[in-house]
Image (spheres, grey):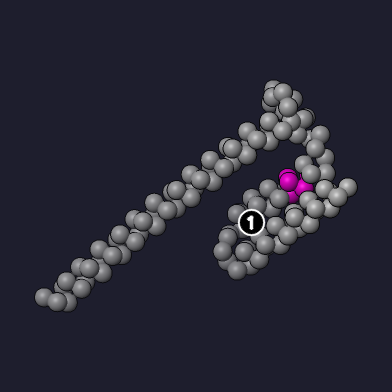
Amino acid sequence: MTLKIVITIFVLFAISRTYLRLKDGAIDTLQFVFWLFVWALVGVIGFWPGVTQRLANILGIERGIDSIVYFSIVVLFYLIYRAYVKIENLEHDITKIVRDESLNEFKKNE
């Protein structure tokens, strides 16, 4: 029972932080829905761990925890890929800005 209380508090805290990031404009609605789904899933698994075994049976995996680990790895790889793409785009934008500023400064000094 103590674990369920801790999970509930954690999930509510995580959802509140996610909502505040949405309100501040740090994340958009789609990201908010994604994280809301993730935290709700954590809550469901915390209260009903048998759900993972049913998922494992559907996927043909032996243990329920293995299905969660596999799913988590896939999600982490996807999130890392998205972060990588965003970083690459930021580097490209910064290079363009620095190049334009340098050319403007050069033209001023001529």
**Local crowd at mark 1 within 10 Å, few (<14), some, or many (≥20)?**
some
Residue positioned 30% across, 59% down in the render: 95
Determine whether, in the image, residue 80 is placed left or right of residue 14: left
Residue 58 visible (yes or no): no
Image spot of residue 7 (x, y percent): 78, 51
Q: Amino acid at mark 1?
A: Phe
Residue 21 vs residue 11, the one in the foreground: 11
Q: Which residue is mark 1?
A: 32
> Residue 85 lies in magenta, yes or no?
no
Considering the image in quadrants, where does the C terminus appear?
bottom left
Q: Is residue 109 above or below residue 21?
A: below
Residue 24 visible (yes or no): yes
Q: Quadrant of residue 69?
A: top right
Residue 90 vs residue 49, the one in the foreground: 49
Residue positioned 79% across, 35% down in the render: 51
Residue positioned 31% across, 65% down in the render: 97
Q: What's the magenta region?
A: 40-44
Image spot of residue 82 (x, y percent): 49, 47
Q: Is residue 20 above or below residue 57?
A: below
Count of marks, rendered view: 1
Q: Is residue 81 above or below residue 8?
A: above
Image spot of residue 14 (x, y percent): 70, 57
Residue closest to the far front: 2
Q: Main secondary structure of the magenta part?
A: helix
Q: Secondary structure at mark 1?
A: helix
Residue positioned 34% across, 61% down in the render: 94
Image spot of residue 43 (x, y percent): 77, 48
